[in-house]
Image: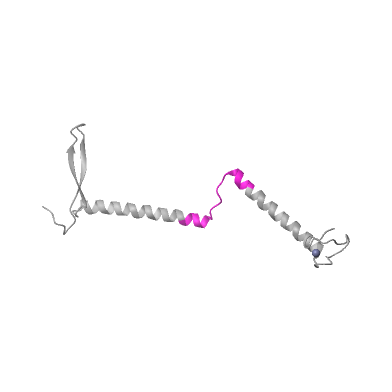
Amino acid sequence: MKCPNCSREASPDAVECAACGLVFDKWKKRKEFEDELSREEKARALAALESGAPPPVDSLTGRWIAAGIAVVWLVGFAAYFHRRYARASGGAPAVEFVERRDPETGEIRRLPIRRPASGAPGKR
Ligand SMILES: [Zn+2]
C-alpha cells in the first residue's frame, strides 16, 4: 500500500509509515469521520435547497426586527394623531386646505396651501 501522506510504498501490515511516521489506523479513522461529516453537510444543504425555504432566522433576531417595525408604526401613528389634535385644538397647522371646484369634472377638491415659514418675507 502507499502512504496517503508521503505516497511512499509501505508494507501492507505496517502500523505506521516508515518514511514520515503517519499512523495508518489514526489516519483512516480521521478520514472516515471527515467523510461522514461532509456527507451530512451535503445532505443538509441539499434538503434546504429542495424545500426552497430560506435559511432559518434566529428567532430572537426575528422578534427584534418585528418589534422594531412595530415601534416605527406606533411612532408614525402617534405623530399623525398628534398633528390632527393639535390642529383641532387651535394649534397652527403646517398645511391648510382650500376647496376648489375642478372646472372639468365639477368635483370639489381639497388643495393644500403651504404657509410661508415663520420669519420668511411674504405678504399677509
Ligand atoms: Zn508516509
In the rendered image of this protein, does residue 6 appear above or below residue 97?
A: below
Please state which of residues 23 and 74 is positioned toward the viewer in this rendering. Answer: 23
Q: Main secondary structure of the magenta part?
A: helix
Q: Is 23 within the magenta?
A: no
Residue 5 sits in which quadrant? bottom right
Between residues 14 and 41, which one lies in front from this camera angle? 14
Percent position of residue 52, x then y:
57, 44
Residue 18: x, y in percent? 84, 67
Indicate the position of residue 15 as horizontal and vertical percent values: 85, 64
Please state the extent of the stretch shown in magenta in the rendering.
46-64
Residue located at (21% from left, 38% from top) = 109
Task: Point out the residue furthest to the top here.
Answer: 105
Left-right relation of 35 to 16: left
* Left or right of 36, for residue 3: right
Given residues 60 and 117, the one toward you in this image is 117
Q: Position of residue 103 (x, y in %)?
A: 18, 33
Quarter holding the N terminus?
bottom right
